[in-house]
């Protein structure tokens, strides 16, 4: 700031009203490095009783204190990044300190002389998280694609060289290549369907869907794999139609994924049951609902994994899931579709006993 003396100082009261109207955390620090004003957001961020405290007691962070000292001494604005430990994570703050004429204590304003530092805090946590999520996501996708691509390149080389005149080996390698290419196609189409669901997440579905008939048709498409795995696939549904406002194609995807998982990971139990029930009043959804539970009696899932099961690419046993052609996106898609329907997904599982995946959809 070049000409502090020429600017009439604002009164502290006026400044309090202005800063109080801002959504971001802002404090005002006087030349003695004391906090003379903190708006509501700043008191939430830094603690209720911060007005009147010295700066170093408010936030013990050397770079933060140094930035404000620089502003107070030289009138220069300065920016600093501060990371605070937070319950279960970190809060990332972009802090800007800028010089303003020190406010007059009285109501009328007027010349107070000297300089104060107006310090604002921008919470960058959500942004940092989304940047790191995107980074992880790209790394995961690249990794998932690189494995089958490396295999394909290797087999192409072998087919051109060592296996050139060996029809039996050629057949076998072509079979593997077909499988790897199929895996990439599945991965890409799962990613596309995930991004389509995400794009529509705010739009509520409008079709009227009869759930029992929908479940029967999804089950029909799994009849052969179920028989091959020695699993009895049964539906337990009330008499008469059960209709919902839903996106039929997306519900097909949900139950396709859940039944496929039950058959893939829970076949050892020999039975997969789908149970459709009407609920008069669902406490969490606060109204009538429909519950569809897909239960297997297979090996179950360690409770340790349950909170992360619906994350993209998360698998309990990566090797085994890959072997079965899985991409680890099935439950992430399920979760997004259920969210779009304003429903809930609940997972109960016990090692050695099996798992139940419950989809609860509002029927209001
Ligand atoms: N019924 C189940 N019993 C035991 N484990 C399960 C069951 N359903 C899912 N899992 C575990 O959860 C993981 C994530 O499931 P998800 O459907 O998201 O991915 P996937 O089946 O591996 O791949 P994809 O569905 O994309 O083909 C699976 O890898 C598996 O380890
Ligand atoms: Mg799956």
Image (cartoon, helix red, strand yellow):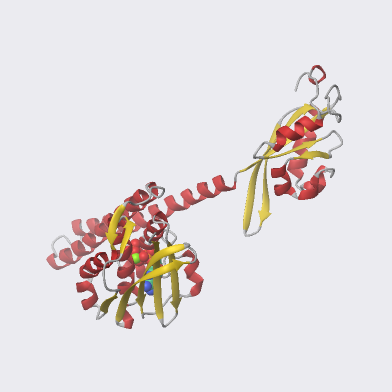
- For the image, the number of numbered tags is 0
In the rendered view, tell whether residue 265 sits above or below residue 164: below
- Give the x, y percent position of residue 341: 39, 56
112 and 33: which is toward the camera: 112
Q: Which residue is drawn at 44% across and 70% down?
A: 347
- Give the x, y percent position of residue 182: 24, 59
21 and 35: which is toward the camera: 21
In the rendered view, tell whether residue 296 sits above or below residue 92: below
Name the quadrant of the C terminus.
bottom left
- Give the x, y percent position of residue 82: 68, 45
Q: Can residue 326 be seen here?
A: no
Q: Seen in the image, is 22 located left or right of residue 14?
A: left
Q: Seen in the image, is 34 located left or right of residue 151?
A: right
- Give the x, y percent position of residue 150: 32, 56
Question: Toward which corner of the image does residue 355 lie, by quadrant?
Answer: bottom left
Question: Toward which corner of the image does residue 64 lie, by quadrant?
Answer: top right
Q: Which residue is drawn at 86% across and 29% down?
A: 106
């Amino acid at each position: 700031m070049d000409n502090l003396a020429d600017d009439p100082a604002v009164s502290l009261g006026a400044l309090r009203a202005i800063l109080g109207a801002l959504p971001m955390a802002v404090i005002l620090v006087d030349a003695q490095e004391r906090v003379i004003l903190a708006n509501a957001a700043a008191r939430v961020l830094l603690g209720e009783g911060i007005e009147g405290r010295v700066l170093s007691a408010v936030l013990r962070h050397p770079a933060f204190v140094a930035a404000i000292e620089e502003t107070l001494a030289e009138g220069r604005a300065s920016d600093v990044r501060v990371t605070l430990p937070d319950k279960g994570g970190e809060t990332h703050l972009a802090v800007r300190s800028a010089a303003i004429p020190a406010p007059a204590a009285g109501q009328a304003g007027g010349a107070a002389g000297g300089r104060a530092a107006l310090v604002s805090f921008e919470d960058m946590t959500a942004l940092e998280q989304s940047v790191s999520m995107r980074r992880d996501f790209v790394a995961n996708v690249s990794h998932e694609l690189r494995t089958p691509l490396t295999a394909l390149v290797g087999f192409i080389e072998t087919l051109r060289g060592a296996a050139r005149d060996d029809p039996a080996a050629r057949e076998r390698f072509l079979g593997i290549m077909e499988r790897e290419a199929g895996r990439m196609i599945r991965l890409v189409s799962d990613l596309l369907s995930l991004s389509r669901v995400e794009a529509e997440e705010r739009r509520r579905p409008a079709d009227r869907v009869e759930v029992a008939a929908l479940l029967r048709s999804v089950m029909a498409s799994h009849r052969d794999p179920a028989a091959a795995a020695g699993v009895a696939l049964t539906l337990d549904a009330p008499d008469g139609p059960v209709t919902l406002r839903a996106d039929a194609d997306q519900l097909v995807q949900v139950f396709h994924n859940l039944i496929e998982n039950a058959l893939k990971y829970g076949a050892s139990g020999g039975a997969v049951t789908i149970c459709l029930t009407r609920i008069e009043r669902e406490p969490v959804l606060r109204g009538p609902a429909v519950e569809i539970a897909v239960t297997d009696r297979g090996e179950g899932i360690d409770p340790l994994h349950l909170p992360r099961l619906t994350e993209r690419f998360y698998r309990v046993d990566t090797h085994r899931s890959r072997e079965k052609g899985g991409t680890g996106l099935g439950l992430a898609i399920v979760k997004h579709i259920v969210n779009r329907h304003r429903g809930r997904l609940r997972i109960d599982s016990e090692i050695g006993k099996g798992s139940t995946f419950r989809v609860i959809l509002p029927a209001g």
